[in-house]
Image (spheres, helix red, strand yellow):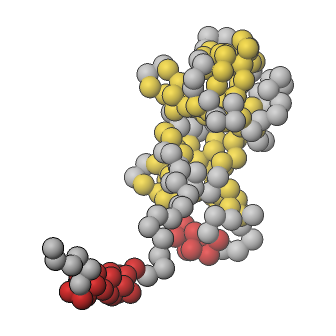
Amino acid sequence: MRQIFSVRFFAAIGAVFGLFLLLTAVFGGGDPVAEFRDPDPIPRQLDLVEPVFAVVESDFELGDDGVTRGSLDLVLDADRTVRVVEGTYGEISCDELDRIGACAVLADLLGDAVVWFALVPTGPAGTVELPAIDVLDDDFAVLVNGWRVRFAPVLDRRCAEEFASYRELRDELGDAFTSIYSIEERQLVAVVCN
């Protein structure tokens, strides 16, 4: 019977181990295989932006995951009501839901169905304050949170400093400004520097 643990056997094991160390040194590095990255914001087309005059709840709750439980009817006027059904994604930043016209509904619609919604505070003169504009794309402004909304051909810039163009404003300020949406004009009309 031949001896299994010969010099050749240990030389072969040593060669494989040495090759492994060489490959690890060349290609291994200290980089992790996977790294955590914040996901890009989910794009939301704002098809509806309207003031809310009354809210009718039926066991309504917005969970920590942003999904509704129960239903919510948002009365826009005498003829129009938006129904948010259970399982709809949304967010609520308006604290005065019981005050007439204090909140506006922003909704991504599929036909008449609400796919996603947000209830936000209304501002003076029928306006809604929105996040900064990330990109101007054809007739739509894409906001830093992924929302897409129409914008006016000329945006009023309310800043202490004058900027020759929107690009210059964006390069200088980054996201340090807010966008103003006019409910009457149904488009972004201004940017306000912070």
**Residue under the point 64% across and 71% down:** 173
**Residue under the point 50% across and 54% down:** 40
- Residue 102 in view (yes/no): yes
Residue 109 in the image: state x and y as whole percent: 49, 28
Q: Is residue 149 left or right of residue 59?
A: left
Instruction: Please state, as top left, top right, bottom left or bottom right, where the C terminus lies in the image.
Output: bottom right
Q: Nearer the viewer, residue 15 or 22?
A: 15
Residue 99 in the image: state x and y as whole percent: 84, 25
**Residue under the point 61% across and 69% down:** 174
Q: Is residue 63 left or right of residue 147?
A: right
Q: Is residue 159 left or right of residue 139?
A: right
Residue 185 found in image quarter: top right
From the viewer's perspective, is residue 6 above or below residue 173?
A: below
Residue 38 found in image quarter: bottom right
Q: Nearer the viewer, residue 115 or 153?
A: 115
Instruction: Please state, as top left, top right, bottom left or bottom right, where the N terminus lies in the image.
Output: bottom left
State the residue lying farthest toward the left. 1
Image mark count:
0
- Residue 154 in view (yes/no): no
Q: Nearer the viewer, residue 158 or 105?
A: 105
Residue 16 in the image: state x and y as whole percent: 27, 81
Residue 104 in the image: state x and y as whole percent: 69, 32
Q: Is residue 99 left or right of residue 43?
A: right
From the viewer's perspective, is residue 52 above or below residue 40?
A: above
State the residue lying farthest toward the front. 1
